[in-house]
Image: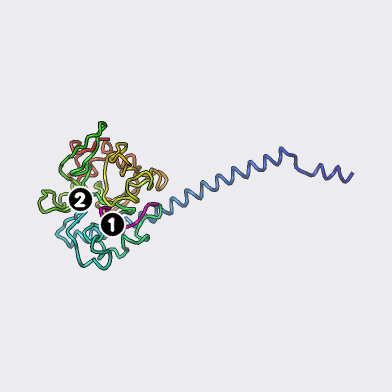
């Protein structure tokens, strides 16, 4: 009699499988919620970084004749001790007096970014989680390889905040008054980086590029590759009026959708777009 009661009070195989299935579903839902919470926390931290950098950029502009820094400037020896002589010519070094967190340290960067953080090494430019809108919806003086393998060089006008400086170049840093719609003009955003395997570089370059969504710049890789889910499905963007928002990267880097907000005159300039 006792044995029959024990059997009646036990679980059948079907009941056990149902319980296991319910536990698996709850675990999957919990993991998804935790993943979303983590991405949201990373995004909030990243937005705060960009906002602080935007404030620093505005202070730089107000103290330098209302002009934005070049992406790559003449060197500034006063920052040698902080970032090394090779790095003082980059835009991010110019923000040091106004934003004390150093580019070469992880705390400066987005926690959702998985690439390397480094200054200039030989012919390799600095890499990290953020990039500057130096050229607008284009890549100035850029070389690309077409489908037949021929290398083409293209020289165009720049409509970004400040290209690489050269004495002989007619490209100059942009003044604040030239920006037609500050609330709809990109200043910085998260850098384009997917993985070390996918990109030519081991991290995101500190120059921001528009276009080249599918077209490989190099035969051996694609330095324009980007991870489409760094914060859920968005990249964080700093605008010239210092507000920060999230934009889907497939829209952000597509000149067909967003070219005007890359250019200080708020015009698309399709003649400058790189091939896709």
Mark 1 or 2, nearer chain start: 1
Q: Is 26 left, or right, of 45 in this rendering?
A: right
The overriding secondary structure of the stretch rendered in magenta is: loop
Q: Position of residue 183 (x, y in %)?
A: 25, 48
What's the mark number on residue 161? 2
Which residue sits at x=33%, y=54%? 128
Q: Is residue 237 above or below residue 79?
A: above
Query: Is label 1 in a helix, a strand or a loop?
Result: loop
Question: Which image quadrant is residue 96 in?
Answer: bottom left
Pick the quarter of the image with the C terminus.
top left
Classify residue 78 by image quadrant.
Answer: bottom left
Let me know if residue 120 is in the magenta part: yes
Q: Residues within 10 Å of mark 2 (few under 14, many from 20)?
A: many
Residue 228 lies in the magenta-colored region: no
Q: How is the image coloured?
A: rainbow
Q: Nearer the viewer, mark 1 or mark 2?
A: 1
Residue span colored magenta: 114-126
- Within-10-Å neighbours for mark 1: few <14, some 14–19, many 20+: few
Residue for badge 1: 121
Query: Which residue occupies the foreground of this view, 61 or 211?
Result: 211
Q: Can you see residue 115?
A: yes
Q: How many marks?
A: 2
User: Residue 269 placed where, x, y %?
Assistant: 18, 38
Q: Is residue 42 left or right of residue 84?
A: right
Residue 65 percent across, percent down from the top left: 14, 59
Which residue is at the front of the view, 221 or 89? 221
Q: Quadrant of the N terminus?
A: top right
Determine the CA span between mark 1 and mark 2: 25 Å
Confirm whether residue 190 shows in the render: no
Spot occupied by residue 92 in the image (x, y as percentages of width and height): 26, 58
């Amino acid at each position: 009699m006792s044995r029959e009661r024990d059997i009646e009070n036990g679980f059948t195989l079907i009941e056990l499988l149902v319980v296991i299935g319910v536990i698996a579903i709850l675990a999957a839902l919990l993991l998804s919620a935790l993943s979303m919470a983590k991405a949201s926390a990373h995004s909030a931290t990243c937005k705060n970084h960009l906002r602080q950098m935007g404030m620093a950029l505005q202070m730089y502009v107000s103290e330098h004749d209302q002009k934005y820094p070049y992406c790559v400037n003449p060197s500034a020896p006063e920052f040698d001790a902080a970032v090394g002589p090779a790095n003082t010519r980059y835009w991010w070094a110019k923000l040091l007096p106004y934003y004390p967190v150093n580019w070469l340290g992880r705390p400066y960067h987005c926690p959702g970014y998985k690439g390397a953080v480094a200054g200039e090494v030989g012919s390799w430019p600095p890499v990290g989680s953020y990039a500057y809108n130096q050229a607008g919806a284009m890549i100035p003086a850029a070389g690309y390889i077409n489908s037949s393998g021929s290398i083409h060089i293209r020289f165009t006008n720049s409509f970004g905040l400040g290209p690489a400086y050269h004495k002989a170049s007619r490209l100059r840093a942009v003044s604040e008054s030239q920006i037609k719609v500050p609330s709809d003009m990109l200043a910085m955003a998260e850098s384009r980086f997917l993985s070390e395997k996918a990109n030519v570089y081991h991290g995101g370059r500190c120059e921001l590029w528009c276009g080249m969504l599918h077209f490989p710049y190099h035969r051996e890789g694609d330095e324009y590759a980007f991870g489409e889910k760094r914060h859920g499905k968005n990249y964080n963007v700093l605008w010239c009026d210092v507000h920060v928002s999230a934009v889907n990267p497939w829209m952000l880097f597509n000149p067909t959708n967003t070219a005007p907000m890359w250019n200080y005159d708020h015009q698309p300039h399709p003649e400058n777009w790189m091939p896709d």
